[in-house]
Image (cartoon, rainbow, N blue to C red):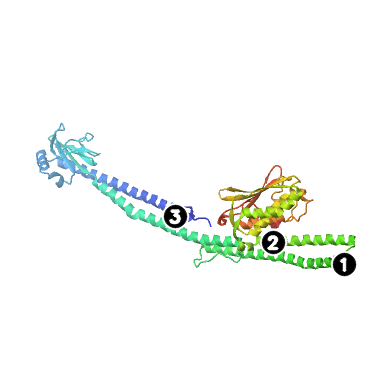
């Protein structure tokens, strides 16, 4: 089964999206609350100072100076900073050393970001100031910092950390849990469908008590699998019954003809006719046997005998089997099978497929021609190569040759029933390999691409059993 990656889960990605929207919405909400509160608090302080400064400016400047020197002025009037200055701006009293340059003595509030204190230090915090001229010409400056806004900002940050962040983490954790749970169900469903494809037609998707959308989908798929199993079994039984029904009367006819052969020994003409009849029956036997073989392979029953198989050894056996035939026809066999390549499969079936390809190449290669049999490797994917320099197969015919009983115009004169390549395609499909045909100019190249790890195998370019059956 393919490796599960949490980030590829649609549920988890959707949860991340919702969590991101939740965080963004809360940031906007808290930002709006902070902004509105800051505006309200700033206006409140400005209004307080603008109301208070006219009242304070009516008093005696000397009394104000004395109160400032005793450090009582700010506490009594709820101020952060204050100062009393001459009309020309010279310092008289208070903890503010200079009148801020951007602060006119008109009784209007201004926000000042930094100001110098009487102890020659500079305050970096923002404050709201109001300056007002007194009756004697001196200037009174009062101010109040906006520490409440900083406190509010800290409170908003804490609310975000304590509320939004844990909630987002919880949402992501729940999304991950739901994704893993759904992946577990999907993995089991994929396993069932994979087993069904391999011939275990009894497998069905499991149902839970949740009765959710996935259960309803599983019910619909199970109904479809029931119908498929019924149709496959019916098709399999029909094909088997036809083949078996043919074998029995054909066996009887062949037996009678053999007895007749013995009786007519020495009579050349009747014996020649009988020989032809027996040969025709033998071809019929081969045909029905091939049909039964294809049916068995397509139902996936042959997977039970899978084991580790050395492709090179199997190819050598296939070549040795047909080497005498190639020599008799004057066809040279070039073999390149040095490297060991092991796959999981049925050795006998693979030998049958490779032997069919070699036999097919010998049939269509003219006398004095050459056939190349090799194994190539690319990214841990061994590829079987069977190449000849015969007439080749046209682009239009390459899909047709894998259909049952198909015989092209260039093969009409060659003996055969048109079941060799369909049998190869069925074996390739069973193993999860892929097969394709290319132009060798002249001749053609058959390539069977194999996987070293059968858990990743998929037939990518060869016809399906359904396609073969349609032939």
- The percent position of residue 28, horizontal first and vertical second, equals 37, 48
Q: Nearer the viewer, residue 184 or 53?
A: 184
In whole angstroms, how far apart are the C-alphas of marks 3 and 2? Answer: 51 Å
If you read the primary sequence from the N terminus, does the residue marked by circle 3 or circle 2 appear first? 3
Q: CA distance from mark 1 to mark 2?
A: 35 Å
- The label shown at residue 240 is none
Residue 238 vs residue 318, the one in the foreground: 318
Circles 1 and 3: CB atoms closer than 8 Å: no
Residue 263 marker = 1
- 13 horizontally vs 294: left or right: left
- Mark 1 / mark 2, whichever is N-terminal: 1
Q: Is residue 106 left or right of residue 171?
A: left
Q: Which residue is mark 3?
A: 15
Residue 62, image x and y in percent? 9, 39
**In which image quadrant can residue 353 be found?**
bottom right
For this rendering, which residue is in front, 418 or 168? 418
- At a point 16% along the width and 42% down the height, the residue shown is 55
**Relative side of 116 to 423, left or right:** left
Image mark count: 3
Q: Is residue 237 above or below residue 463?
A: below
**In what element is the residue under mark 2?**
helix
Q: CA distance from mark 1 to mark 3?
A: 86 Å
Residue that appears at 66% across and 58% down = 349
Q: Position of residue 153 (x, y in %)?
A: 29, 48
Residue 402 lies, with reference to residue 94, above or below; the image says below
Q: Which residue is mark 2?
A: 293
Q: Nearer the viewer, mark 1 or mark 3?
A: 1
State which mark lies toward you, 1 or 2: 1
Label 2 Cα crowd, 10 Å radius (few <14 / some 14-19 / many 20+): some
Q: Are marks 3 and 2 in contact (CB under 8 Å)?
A: no
Residues 230 and 352: in front is 352
Instruction: Work out whether residue 421 can be spotted.
Output: no
């Amino acid at each position: 089964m393919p490796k599960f990656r949490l980030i590829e889960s649609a549920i988890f990605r959707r949860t991340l999206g919702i969590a991101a929207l939740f965080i963004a919405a809360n940031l906007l909400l808290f930002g709006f609350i902070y902004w509105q509160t800051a505006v309200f608090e700033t206006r409140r302080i400005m209004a307080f100072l603008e109301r208070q400064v006219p009242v304070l400016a009516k008093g005696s400047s000397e009394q104000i100076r004395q109160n400032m020197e005793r450090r009582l002025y700010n506490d009594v009037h709820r101020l952060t900073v204050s100062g009393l200055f001459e009309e020309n701006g010279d310092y008289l009293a208070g903890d503010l050393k200079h009148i801020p340059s951007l602060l006119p003595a008109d009784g209007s509030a201004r926000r000042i970001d930094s100001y110098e204190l009487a102890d020659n230090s500079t305050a970096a915090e923002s404050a709201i100031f109001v300056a007002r001229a007194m009756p004697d010409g001196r200037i009174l400056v009062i101010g109040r910092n906006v520490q409440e806004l900083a406190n509010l900002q800290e409170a908003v940050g804490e609310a975000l950390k304590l509320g939004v962040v844990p909630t987002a983490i919880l949402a992501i954790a729940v999304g991950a849990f739901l994704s893993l749970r759904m992946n577990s169900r999907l993995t089991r469903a994929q396993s069932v469908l994979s087993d069904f494809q391999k011939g275990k037609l009894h497998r069905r998707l499991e149902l839970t008590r949740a009765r959710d959308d996935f259960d309803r989908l599983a019910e619909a798929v199970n109904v479809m699998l029931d119908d498929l199993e019924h149709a496959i079994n019916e098709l399999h039984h029909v094909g088997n019954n036809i083949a078996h029904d043919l074998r029995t009367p054909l066996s009887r006819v062949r037996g009678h003809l053999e007895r007749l052969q013995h009786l007519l020994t020495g009579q050349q003409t009747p014996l020649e006719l009988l020989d032809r009849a027996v040969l025709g029956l033998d071809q019929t036997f081969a045909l029905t046997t091939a049909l039964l073989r294809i049916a068995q392979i397509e139902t996936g029953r042959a997977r039970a005998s899978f084991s580790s198989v050395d492709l090179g050894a199997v190819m050598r056996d296939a070549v040795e089997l047909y080497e005498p035939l190639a020599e008799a026809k004057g066809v040279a066999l070039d073999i390149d099978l040095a490297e060991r390549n092991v796959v999981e499969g049925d050795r006998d079936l693979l030998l049958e497929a490779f032997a069919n390809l070699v036999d097919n190449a010998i049939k269509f290669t003219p006398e004095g021609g050459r056939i190349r049999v090799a194994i190539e490797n690319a990214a841990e994917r061994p590829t079987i190569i069977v190449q000849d320099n015969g007439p080749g197969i046209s682009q239009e015919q390459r899909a047709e040759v894998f259909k049952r009983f198909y015989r092209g115009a260039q093969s009409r004169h060659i003996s055969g029933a048109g079941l060799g390549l369909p049998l190869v395609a069925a074996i390739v499909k069973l193993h999860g390999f892929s097969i394709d045909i290319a132009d060798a100019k002249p001749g053609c190249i058959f390539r069977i691409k194999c996987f070293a790890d059968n858990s990743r195998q998929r037939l990518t370019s060869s016809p399906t059993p359904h396609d073969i059956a349609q032939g």
